[in-house]
Image (spheres, rainbow, N blue to C red):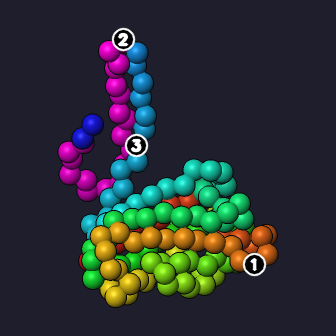
Amino acid sequence: ATLHITLTESTTCTIEVVSETGERASHAIELVYDKDLVGYTAFRDEEYKGTPYLWTGKGPIEFALPAKTGQPHTLHLLWGAKGDERIGFLNINGHEQKLVHGGYDGFEWLKVDIPADWVTGDAIQFRLVEKTDRSRAAFIGEAKLTSP
């Protein structure tokens, strides 16, 4: 199916289908709006305070998002914390950096700048891992990639 719409804000839509045998099925889809959005993904393994997430304490979180070759980007991670600081090691196309964020209970957006010379193709590979005490391991709900 192809959906052609112009978004001015994020929303949810429901897609309904009917099979050849008359069976009906539906699925809610999140439509994410950001004027500079290049790519988006969400993680739905566990839930905290009503927000689904994936935890690096169970293993690496790996994903790829489309990118604009040779352009600077910003990765926005919906970063979880439980009143503490969470630590993760993020590999971006072979460049690793330590991320530390928290001090709140719930989720906040954490921005990670990506220099243009790290974007060598039409996608960026991300790998977030835990290399410390599992009780402080990072957990994220969503990832958005933007580029002006």
Q: What amino acid is labelled 2 in the image?
A: Thr
Task: Tell me the element at label 2.
Answer: loop
CA gap between label 1 and label 3 equals 35 Å
Which residue is located at x 58 percent, y 64 percent? Answer: 61
CA gap between label 1 and label 2 equals 53 Å
Q: What amino acid is labelled 3 in the image?
A: Ile
Tell me the residue that label 2 is attached to: 21
Q: What amino acid is labelled 1 in the image?
A: Thr
Of label 2 and label 3, which has the lower sequence position?
Answer: 2
Main SS, magenta residues: loop
List x then y, in percent, for residue 76.
46, 72
Tell me the residue that label 3 is attached to: 29
Which residue is most to the top?
A: 21
Q: Quadrant of the N terminus?
A: top left
Please provide the residue range marked out in magenta: 3-22
Of label 1 and label 3, which has the lower sequence position?
Answer: 3
CA gap between label 2 and label 3 equals 24 Å
Tell me the residue that label 1 is attached to: 132
51 to the left or right of 32: right
List x then y, in percent, for residue 102.
65, 76
Task: Nearest to the eye among marks 1 and 3: give it.
Answer: 1
